[in-house]
Image (spheres, grey):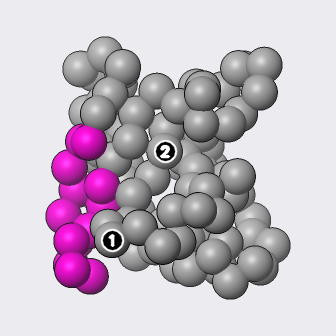
Amino acid sequence: MGKLAFILRFILSVFPADKDENRRHIHVVRRGSKSSHRGDTVAKIWIEENGAKKIEVAWSMLTAPEEQMIVEAIDQHWEELNNLIDQVFEGKKIQVKRIK
């Protein structure tokens, strides 16, 4: 799993297998889970379509305020998150971002 950012009690991540999917997306994992893998994902958020910024919640188990906070953070940090995703997919080690 490629951890991209921490937002309060959540981790924004991508998985190596996501590289070949047709739309770029981020998995939201609740921090403090015993293991951080797909089974602990609480939301999947599309962040682009055909290379253009388009943020949409694919599915979510978050509360409405949590979901809104995360979508706003992704929108605000979209370029940086995309750059981090590129680095993860290239196999580079990244500095995990802390978003307040």
Asked if one can make out residue 80 in the rendered structure from this viewpoint, the answer is: no
Q: Which residue is mark 2?
A: 27
Q: Is residue 95 above or below residue 28?
A: below
Horizontal and vertical percent position of residue 95:
75, 65
CA gap, disc 1 and disc 2: 15 Å
* Residue at 40 percent of width and 75 percent of height: 79
Horizontal and vertical percent position of residue 90:
68, 83
Front residue (pair 49, 84): 49
In this rendering, would 19 be left or right of 45?
A: right
Residue type at mark 1? Asn
Q: Is residue 54 magenta?
A: yes
Q: Is residue 63 above or below residue 50?
A: above
Q: Which secondary structure, mark 2?
A: strand
Residue type at mark 2? His
* Residue at 56 percent of width and 79 percent of height: 86
* Residue at 68 percent of width and 58 percent of height: 2
Q: Which residues are magenta?
A: 46-58
In this rendering, would 57 be left or right of 34?
A: left
Q: Which secondary structure, mark 1?
A: loop
Horizontal and vertical percent position of residue 9:
59, 26
Q: Is residue 4 above or below residue 92?
A: above
Q: Is residue 8 magenta?
A: no
Horizontal and vertical percent position of residue 36:
71, 33
